[in-house]
Amino acid sequence: MCFAACGSRQPPEWFEACSTGNIEQITDLMDDCTQHRDHRPFQIYSKNEQQFMVHTGFTGLMYAIVNNQQEVVELLLNEEYDILCNQDTVVQTSEQWFTHQITVDMQIIQCLKKNNIQFYSQVPAGSTILDLALLLGNLELYIQLAQKLPRRIINHINESGYNNLFYLIELSKFFYLEPVNELTRPLFKFLFQRQSLFYSIHSPTSIKRCLIHGSYAMLDILFSLFSKKYKVAFTSFIDNCNLQDYQDTKEQLKCVQLIAKFKQNEYDEEQSEQNSENNKEPAIVQEIVPEEPTQSTKASNKIPTKTSFVKPPNKSEKDENEQEKFCTAHEQLNFKHFTYSLPKASALLKKVETVKVEDLKPEDLDLQVANLSKEAVKEQQKEDDNIEVDEMVDDLGLVEDIDELKAEIALEEPKQENKEPQMEEVDAEGEEEEGIDAETV
């Protein structure tokens, strides 16, 4: 039997084997069943005295992650690591990690109630395996996977507007996140560099999220790593928060105390001392280099990306450029929110120097960014422009070729000179003139 055709329905035995860790059965079915999702509707059933929950839109790898089958995860990771869940579904959890991640589907609610399932998380469409690990509250698995995956997976935003950082902020209420060891520190540093400045009029900033959830551990990590680098942005975020509204719990009070420490520049002194001792960060574990896909239909399952790890077979350079343009356009059509980073705000301010900042409309400039002075914005942009590409790549521990990255930046810069500011993929590390690109959801 062959189940590899696009849109074909995989046998339930495949997903059951991935859930239970039946390596022998998985090995027999791998050639036909990998890189496909489960098309069955959500349901809970029993078989051989075992309970199975059907997650619509899940792959075999996702089933293995839900059931914490480590051996299966390692076996399927290279095959299915970049496939997204394409429908909203739910997963059972040991605690109610996320109070807002609940479903409104009455059929699912009744099914959960009938089977006495009290705690669960809703998995939004467009979620990665990293989102799934965090929604399950499996922080150990998240860190293990994130150190092996490409940065485009880590930086992905699902259809609910959530990235890894937002989930981690809420999870830190239950786990104290300590990034100082050699393995996890580069990962957390990369994550914060890419996502800590994300802001939208529809979504709280990273600092405000920490205040809301009392996530003092994450706030401490954020300030410890970037209080000096992103001082202007963080100060703006803090000024737009009424700290009196976030003193109901002892965790929120700790966040307020950390903000006071930030304002007194105590973190800057700690960073200076640490930088003198550790001048170089350890590298992240080597990225996955997947094997060349055997079916042209598999490309539709993957996250759009500017730089592919494996070039599709039988495609000319012109075809690849067209595909890249299509992916970029496809991403922009699906944007639900928008935001402007500080350098982008500076570019807009240059175009409206005759207009008062207070008169700018929300659609022209983000409300919180509008509150920044021109001098503060330009100062932040100047700091970001001084970052060298070699230093950026080495600091993050990324394995991409530096010359290739420079060439890519050089090609992108001329295209943006005569264009109006538009939504782009975030790059909080700041690539020369672009600085921190506009974050999008």
Image (cartoon, rainbow, N blue to C red):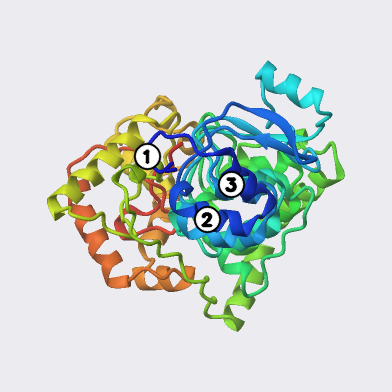
Which residue shows up at 23% across the image and 53% down it?
412
Mark 2–mark 3 distance (CA, rounded to whole Å): 19 Å
The answer to whether residue 91 is visible is no
- The nearer-to-camera label among 2 and 3 is 2
1 or 2: mark nearer the eye: 2
Looking at marks 1 and 2 on the same chain, the residue that comes earlier in the sequence is marked by: 1
> Is 66 in front, or is 225?
66
Q: Where 125 falls versus 136 (above or below)? A: above
In this rendering, the answer to whether 346 lies above or below 31 is above
In front of the other: label 3 or label 1? 1
State the SS at label 3. helix
Q: Residue sitting at 59 percent across and 36 percent down?
A: 204
Task: Give left or right: position of 31 versus 66.
Answer: left
Residue lying at the far right in this picture: please name it.
250
Q: Is residue 159 above or below residue 401?
A: above
Structural distance between the alpha carbons of marks 3 and 1: 20 Å
CB under 8 Å between discs 3 and 1:
no
What residue does disc 3 label?
62
Residue 32: give x, y in percent of width and height. 44, 48
Q: Position of residue 192 (x, y in %)?
A: 55, 56
Residue visible at 42% across and 39% down in the picture:
340
Which residue in the structure is indicated by mark 2? 28
Q: Is residue 79 visible?
A: yes
- What secondary structure is found at the residue carrying circle 2? helix
402 to the left or right of 51: left
The residue pinned by badge 1 equals 5
- Amino acid, disc 3: Met
In this rendering, position of residue 138 left or right of residue 317: right
Q: Amino acid at mark 2?
A: Asp
